[in-house]
Amino acid sequence: LIGAPAEAGFEALRQEIGRHYLPNRIVAHHDPAGGDPPPFPLLSGKGLVNGRAALYVCRNFTCQAPITDPAQVASTLSLPERRSAGGTRSAVGSFLRGSATEAGTAAYAQRFAPSGYGPLGATGLTTSKLGFGGYRIDDETPEQAEALERALLHGCNLIDTSTNYMDGGSERCVGAVLGTLTRAGTLRREEIIIVSKIGYVQGQNLELVQKREAAGRPFPEMVKYMDGCWHCIHPEFLREQLERSLSRLQIETLDVCLLHNPEYFLSDAKARRRGDLESARDEFYRRLRAAFTFFESQVAAGTIRWYGVSSNTVVSPAVDPEATSLTRMLAAAREAGGPAHHSRILQLPMNLCEAGALLTRNTGPDNRQTALEAASSAGIGVLVNRPLNAIVGDRMVRLAASSSRRVHDTISAAIDPLLPEERRGESLSRKALWVLASAPGVSCVLNGMRTHDYVHDSLGILPWPPLDEVIPIYQAVQGLKLHGV
């Protein structure tokens, strides 16, 4: 507990702690007004939060983000202990301090080709135009860890992962590799941008949620979309998941935290026909505002730097019942954090076949802007996912080297006349990544590079200067009939 006993905020926190049975626990207190704290590890580095009394809950030598609201004490104290087996894993060694910085990321870019880097929206950070997508990596496959290490050492300084990727294995892999490289002095923490996402309730998370429900302590506003896949963005759930995410990543500060496909709420409302569309959308953005308010508190506490949303439907036509609006997301962020809010990142799907972010006008006043135009005008950094896996009709079309020869030849024949002659002989995957990275408004293209060879092939586009015009390329692909190819 940090604060003066005479303060109302301090007393409210103390009384709430007293309501809980806490055997074998140590409770320490320090009033910063009385000078430096005694030489006791629990009190080291702890301070007030925006001038208010704060409670720090620490387990296994790791402290969670401080809380000032007595209403959050119960859920924070009820978090399970991290175990070395049969549950979430304990971090090995100390957590990495610091975060990505303007100077650090700029210095990283200067070591490589300048054309392969650019600003991450208005964050001040410099990102590689190609990022490492952690969707299918885990901490038990050495080849994948080696691929991530190779990517970080050869020009890629942004990593994207999520709490649900490989049931936490992706975050553990990222934490292990980054920790090894930084402690060896090969990389600096401030050079690397780490992005993770929260929202999905699957695997171990689903087991946790179900146990809480059985004990009469359910997380509020849980969206039970389907068996095996629930979803939640309530602040109580976000707090619990953020603590686990930081533990797996072994970092003190997450550079970017995104709500992971929050449109599950709209999908569920549509499927169950709950109320009218406008009421569902109003409730959706109310929930976003509450989540953003929590994120702003974590920015103030130093747990995250920036936040935003990863949404597959932000590129959908506005008439789609499941469509999300960047305009309304930003309005919710302003309500949560004021004009200087920290919602500065948007993640969305885009590839040669799915170009809604670039071509569909679905946001802004009277839907006159595309998602990329709206993001650019608001200083939002855009991360593109699914760059090589396109959904065409009811099938998946792969744009990587393993795609069918007919798909490769059909798309290449359409776009090659619009590319410089010296690049027409490149693989379709390289051409697709290059065209994406050249699109105005795109900050970084996330690619799942899980092998040495894949890393080498993908990062080869970083020295290529961006294309001057990409819209005709996307329009050429939109005119193709790929359903039967």
Image: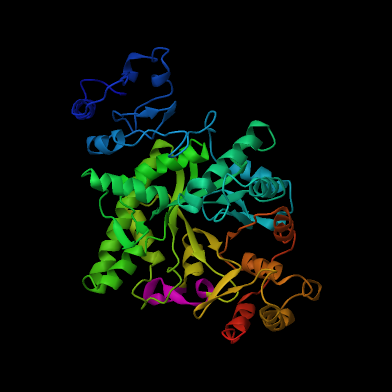
- Above or below, 20 against 208 in this view is above
Which residue is located at x 66 percent, y 37 percent?
181
Q: Does the magenta run of residues contain 105?
A: no
Range of residues picked out in magenta: 356-369
Residue that sits furthest to the top in the current view: 38
> Where is residue 39, by image quadrant?
top left
Position of the N terminus by quadrant: top left
Instruction: Depth check: give the residue in front, 422 or 152.
Output: 152
Tally of marks: 0
Instruction: Depth check: give the residue in front, 410 or 208.
Output: 208
Measured from the top left, where is residue 309 in percent x and y? 43, 57
Instruction: Let me know if residue 349 appears in the view.
Output: yes
Measured from the top left, where is residue 346 in percent x and y? 47, 59
Position of the C terminus by quadrant: bottom right
The reply, left or right, for residue 399 in relation to residue 248 is right
Instruction: Depth check: give the residue in front, 225 or 303.
Output: 225
> Where is residue 482, by image quadrant?
bottom right
> Where is residue 314, by image quadrant?
bottom left
Measured from the top left, where is residue 269 in percent x and y? 28, 68
The reply, left or right, for residue 159 in relation to residue 253 is right
Which residue is located at x 73 percent, y 79 percent?
416
Residue that sits furthest to the front in the current view: 86
- Above or below, 82 against 463 in this view is above
Instruction: Depth check: give the residue in front, 11 or 332.
Output: 11
Instruction: Let me know if residue 235 appears in the view.
Output: no
